[in-house]
Amino acid sequence: MPMLFCFGLGYSARRLAVKLEDDGWHIAGTARSAEGVERIQDLGYMGYVFDGLKPGVGSGPSQGAGPAARRASHIVVSAPPDAQGDPVLRHHAGDIAQSNAEWIGYLSTIGVYGDHGGAWVDETTPATPLSERSRRRALAEQQWLDFGKASGKRVEIFRLAGIYGPGSSAIEGLRSGTTRSIVKTDQVFNRIHVEDIARTLIAAFSRPHVHAIYNVTDDEPAPPQDVNAYAAMILGLPPPVEIAYEAADLSEMGRSFYSENKRVRNDRIKNDLGVELAFPTYREGLAAIAEETA
């Protein structure tokens, strides 16, 4: 029976796990705390503590995760990297190299492309990350590609756009009154619904290996104020007051987020993986969330 092991069984990986569980897969994964493991176990999955990023319990290899990963037929890695790269490889490369895994997916970010002034990019565009977080992702990507070559394992990189879905979207933000519309001239972002991430990963490991890197994005990069206004229309609420970027009180992370402007193509997942997006734009995605969470 196939088994999925997720280093970082968080929001995106859980959506994948639920879809595979329905097809009879065994599921296991890690969380960064005992409380997180309890949440995994509440779903009926095996959970293990693993946190390679900070000192303390779980900061080294996880004794439970290693044997479980060795039994896995498929492995997804969404745990964040640190300045030295990917902690999963640092602590569990041996387990993964000796595993039954026929496919390994590393979840990265389109942030590795850096800023392109709103121009279109695709998987052939060189990675030129600006932020420290994106530089770490680019380093981890290369480590995983190198690991795949050295171990003979099939490794594929998935560069995700801004993730949204039930419980994490402009719909919930508007209902709670926490959504802000930060307006920066000509700024656009790609997004991706969590359901379409799961669809893409399943399509990838269900098909022969064609590419090492895939962009996982929607069809329509759009300004954030347009997304918020559409969500407000669906809910029958007034749109959030627009705040000029220059006047916005943003964190350093928020500033870095707005420092990158690009439009990201997704032709590869459609043409080579046969993915049909459930939510090709934010409109379909937000409408579904509003109905699902009404």
Image: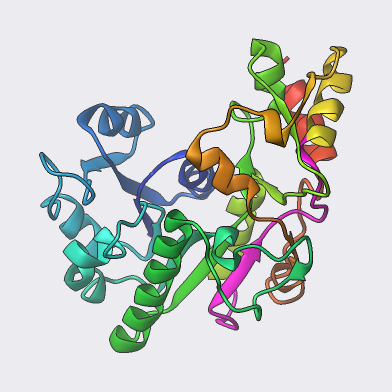
Q: Looking at this view, is 199 or 239 the one in front? A: 239
Magenta run includes residue 218: yes
The answer to which quarter of the image holds residue 216 is: bottom right
User: Seen from this angle, which residue lies furthest front?
Assistant: 246
Q: Position of residue 283 (x, y in %)?
A: 84, 37
Left/right of residue 88 with respect to residue 244 in the rendered view: left
160 left or right, relative to 188: left
As drawn, 63 above or below 112: above
Q: Answer left or right for 241 relative to 35.
A: right
Relative height, residue 118 to residue 42 (above, below): below
Compare residues 135 and 279 and report the one nearer the observer: 135
Q: Is residue 82 left or right of residue 187?
A: left
Residue depicted at x 70% and y 27% = 170
Magenta run includes residue 44: no
Residue at 25 percent across and 67 percent down: it is: 89
User: Count the marks: how many?
Assistant: 0
Asked if 293 appears above or below 94 in the picture, the reply is above
The answer to whether residue 293 is seen in the rendering is: no
Q: Position of residue 231 (x, y in %)?
A: 81, 26
Question: Which x, y percent locates residue 109?
Answer: 54, 58
**For the magenta stretch, what is the residue range?**
206-224
Q: Residue at x 47, y 47 (%)?
A: 13
Query: Closer to the camera, 17 or 231?
Result: 231
- Work out whether residue 146 can be spotted: yes
Which quadrant: the C terminus? Answer: top right
Residue 227 pos. (x, y %): 80, 34
The N terminus, quarter of image: bottom left
- Dominant secondary-structure state across the stretch colored magenta: loop
Q: Report the front residue among 207 and 251.
A: 251
Q: Is residue 235 above or below residue 184?
A: above
**Residue at 71% across, 66% down:** 116
